[in-house]
Amino acid sequence: MIILKVNGAEQKLEVDPDMPLLWVLRDVLGLTGTKYGCGQALCGACVVHLDGETVRACVTPVKRAAGGSVTTIEGLSPTGDHPLQRAWVELGVPQCGFCQAGQIMSAAALLRKNPRPSNDDIDRSLAGNICRCGTYTRIRAAVRKAAGLPTE
């Protein structure tokens, strides 16, 4: 049995310890906000927080999260009003929306560590998150807005 907290709630899981955390979240717990993109930790669609740090859930075995705390996009703000989520909507960032949960989770980790990031900080922090639609300038603007910086 693997015990961990997901979005603040303790979960007792009878799963293969080597099962990727992504499949535990999506298929076992029904938290489908975290997306499967590449399955190789290359695209960032599956980013979640494990004990406050970003991890690629598609390649993270659930046993690595045992005893820890996982936050998914659903747990970032249960009402969807996290400053990043509001900025995303206000600036019309999403097109297809597929990468957005991973982008927001990566941005949330950045803002937790660096509440007033420069454009270079934002670009470096989100460089591992691929947006098929190419909304990178809107993503950067939304991160800046959430940080209380001018969106340029």
Image: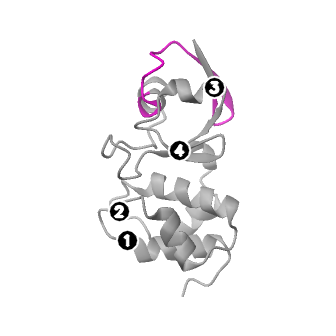
User: Looking at the figure, which quarter contains the N terminus?
Assistant: top right
Residues at discs 4 and 3 in contact (Cβ within 8 Å): no
**Disc 1 residue type (three-letter):** Thr
Q: Which mark is residue 135?
A: 1
Residue carrying label 2: 131
**Disc 2 residue type (three-letter):** Cys
Q: Tag 2, which secondary structure?
A: loop
Residue carrying label 3: 4
What is the spatial separation of the Cα atoms under label 3 and label 1, in whole angstroms? 34 Å
Residue visible at 63% across and 25% down?
4
What is the spatial separation of the Cα atoms under label 4 and label 1, in whole angstroms? 21 Å
Residue carrying label 4: 48
Q: Earlier in the sequence, mark 4 or mark 2?
A: 4
**Disc 4 residue type (three-letter):** Val
User: Is residue 8 among what the camera can see?
Assistant: yes
Residues at discs 1 and 2 in contact (Cβ within 8 Å): yes
Residues at discs 2 and 3 in contact (Cβ within 8 Å): no
Residue 14 part of the magenta segment: yes
Mark 4: few/some/many CA within 10 Å (<14, 14-19, 20+): many
**Disc 3 residue type (three-letter):** Leu
